[in-house]
Image: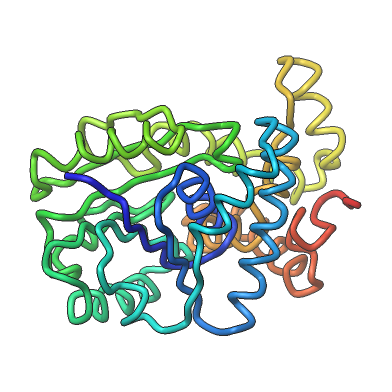
Amino acid sequence: MEFNNVTIIGGGTLGSQIGFMSAFHNKNVTIWGRSDQSIDRTKARIDRWETAVRIDLNATDEQIKNAEKHLQYTTDLKDALAGADLVIEALPENVATKDEFYDQFKELADSNTILVTNTSTFLPSQFAEATGRPDKFLAYHFANEIWKFNTAEIMPQSKTDSALPAALKQYSQEIGMIPVMINQEQPGYILNSLLVPFLNNALILWSKGIASPEDIDNTWTIGTGAPSGPFRIMDTVGMKTIYEITHNSSDPDLQVAAEKVKTMIDAGKIGRESGEGFYKYN
């Protein structure tokens, strides 16, 4: 099972990174966006990833140009899905949004196309039947800045074909990732099972006025030697993703924190991408 023609559904922070690093490793990549404006934002993100891999991976001009040759963009979903070996859904953490795409996917995609979801918190079994091909579906999760923090978590559901996790393991290695096999379904995989509670508790400390983001981050980085504190991490992830993960929580303290995050989003402070989140960036 080889994946050479890859379609990314959604060119947000992670979708654009997955698409770029796949193209960087010679995969033919199509990134689908909802509108021309969405595609423009995706291309701007790709420009940032090009700069990052020059710094972090010492990528050459030739490598960057080669990656660009392997990338194309479209707003036409039928065209995006045509001939795809692998489709990676990287849409927002919203059940209705994902279900809407799966309804279209099962009508438009080739019968042999493999589909994976990059969901951060949902289980693949929640969507398996909606895809129309549960045997060709699993969850496939990346950490942010995937060229540097290069894990790829592979999580099947009960109806996933037994050969598919191994095929995704091979693909992960081909695009420079370290595959991590998840043996049974777990909301948040390994990474987010550890990370999300950490970020949530930081948000609650901030929301209650216990301490500022700067002091919370400094306490964590100085006290543990970690390179980044929770609020720097959230600025990298982006406020929209943080809000999607937190606003439906049953914890009233986290609900209050989520509304404060929503106020930041409404003010255009969505993290590094906009130049300001909890911190300001050049």
- Indicate left or right for 214 with 147 as reference: right
Give the percent coordinates (x, y) of residue 198: 59, 35
Q: Front-most of 55 and 9?
A: 55
Q: Residue at 54% of width from left, 35% of height from top? A: 195
For the N terminus, give its image quadrant: top left
Give the percent coordinates (x, y) of residue 253: 62, 52
Q: Residue at 86% of width from left, 49% of height from top? A: 279
Q: How many marks?
A: 0
Q: Front-most of 1 and 241?
A: 1
Give residue 231's quadrant in the image. Answer: top right
Q: Front-most of 119 and 200?
A: 119
Q: Residue at 68% of width from left, 38% of height from top? A: 60
Give the percent coordinates (x, y) of residue 132: 13, 70
Q: Residue at 50% of width from left, 81% of height from top? A: 34
- Indicate left or right for 35 with 266 as reference: left
Q: How is the image coloured?
A: rainbow
- Indicate left or right for 27 with 277 as reference: left
Q: Front-most of 64 and 93?
A: 64
Position above or below: 125 against 59: below
Give residue 264's quadrant in the image. Answer: bottom right
- Indicate left or right for 170 with 91 as reference: left
Position above or below: 1 against 74: above
- Check the image and name the residue furthest to the front: 62
